[in-house]
Amino acid sequence: MAKSTPPSTGKKAQEKPASDSARGAEPLLIEVAWEVCNQVGGIYTVLRSKVPSMMSRWGSRYCLVGPYNPHTAEVEFEPAPLVGAVGQAVQKLQEMGYRAHYGRWLVSGRPHVVLLDVGSVGGVLNEIKYRVWDDHQIPASDETNVNDAVAFGEMCRALLSILAQGEGQRRQLVAHFHEWQAGMAIPMLRKEHWPGSLVFTTHATLIGRYVATGDAGFYDHLPFLDADQEAKNFNVHAQHQIEKAAAHAAHVFTTVSDVTARECTHLLGRTPDMLLPNGLNIHRFTASHEFQTLHQQYKERLHRFSMGHFFPSYHFDLDNTLYMFTSGRYEYLNKGMDLTIEALARLNHRLREAASPVTVVFFIITKAPFRSINVRALQSRAMLREFRTAANAVKESVGDGLFRAASSGEIPDLNVLMEDYWRLRLRRAIQAWKSEAPPGIVTHDLIDEAHDPVLNQLRACRLFNHEDDPVKVVFHPDFVQATSPLFGMEYEQFVRGCHLGVFPSYYEPWGYTPLESIALGVPAVTSDLSGFGSYLQQLVPEHASKGMYVVPRRHNDFHRAAEELTDRLFRFTSLSRRDRVILRNSVEAFSEHFDWHNLGRHYNDAHDLALARVSG
């Protein structure tokens, strides 16, 4: 097994891999993950956005391996002839009775990809599970995700073994695996003395994610946790053992942040060799000089939402309105939603006490079970369309009359030019529009409204969207997309229209949401317990001046952290329009730092180190 060493953020390995001439050809890189061509979580974003960076170094020597999902493959996968080293290995795999598909992933860079159908292992699955227990002491389990991981691991092992038989004497091979779902092949390959180099990356430890969800003192308790016992308590013992075996069997073990590295040391028993921070394909988000214009354009759409949601009850000055948001998986404590709502309640009090002219509309965007969109919300949107129809008709009618009168040398009474039909229709619409009830705080009818933690905390904090509340809250329990009748725009457009993203996570191995926010030119708040926040504190000393704020949670209790977040939000509301424009410029300019063409070098270092450890 590889010896544990302190993690690095990507300094070049001292060892040098054997020259390519000594092996006859340049190395081949195989990257394996459950989310290749299969969007089920954040690792899909990591892999997809990283492809152009990987292709720039490896070119046709780069291939990804993932599970075959017919629904996603139909959209993202294009079959190709079984040629080349990997194509021929797939052909031999098929001859063994396994269903495997070779082709291209239809993303930027169009890399080669192999998709393995784990269902084709069914007939020998029990035999494989016995071997896994006998060789690696990983217990058998009838859970679907464990069965899939074992089947996928066996197919990866077979594919890489075939590849080594054909290519191992001619070139060096590197196999890079992500997360426990793909990690089973690593101890299998080490058992049979596979000649290539093995890299394993965990993006979040399995036990860490489970325990942190219910333990407010997780980081204080971390050194004293018995990971194996916790795995049994949460009924994920087999999954944990796969993750642990992969971490110890890999030649190079990596994770995404120093926050998660600490978890690995205590929960997996091996300190990562280096850190591989996550990036984005920033050029995909770049709008150059247009991003301020886009902010204004999409902010107008948020204004229309505010008019539909709030104006039937009362109105406020949209020119003095700031839009803030949080988004992500519905992990109430892990994502810091509890801290965010507490800070909003305190901000509401502060703005009222300061008699601030600013109104804050705060969106909580996540996915929670619901029956349908609230009828009142739909009615308000329908009434807005009625106003727009009437306004356009009146504009056309008055415009024609004004044009004719002016051409005759007259200045008419504009009231006379407005047709009685449209005057009456507008009057009726305005009457139907008015409401005595305050605006709702949730846009959908939730299935379990009585036990929803976000809704219950909003009620406990008395954030009811009263007219005198400077902070208005909109809980939208569905993801924003163009087909939504309430927003009618994509998530990226929604973010561009906002002024600030708020993500003070308690448990966040990396944190893509604040990174996406700044990539879109929107300042963001994160925490020092997220990998991204820790990265900013260590490597970007002036992050606050660049519109990237880090709330200290590591050594703060909940109330002190809430006060810190409230201070940050209050200071943001006090900025002038000019200051906010300057901040957006700074954020947009600095986001280039997080492009994969900069951060991808850490992956290169990990692969170089793996090659050096095997050839040395």
Image: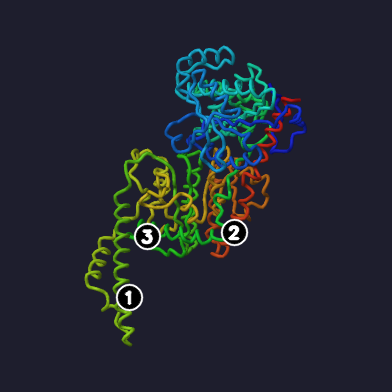
- Report which residue position mark 1 lands on: 399
Is disc 1 placed on a helix, strand or loop? helix
- Report which residue position mark 3 lands on: 307
Could you say which is closer to the camera, residue 399 or residue 513?
399
Residue drawn at 50 percent across, 26 percent down: 100
Three-letter amino acid code of the residue under disc 1: Gly
Is disc 2 placed on a helix, strand or loop? helix
Structural distance between the alpha carbons of marks 2 and 1: 40 Å
**On-image quarter of the N terminus:** top right
Q: Position of residue 504 (x, y in %)?
A: 54, 45
Q: Quadrant of residue 162?
A: top right
Could you say which is closer to the camera, residue 74 or residue 326?
74
Q: Position of residue 384 (x, y in %)?
A: 32, 60
- Report which residue position mark 2 lands on: 585
Structural distance between the alpha carbons of marks 1 and 3: 26 Å
Q: Earlier in the sequence, mark 1 or mark 3?
A: 3
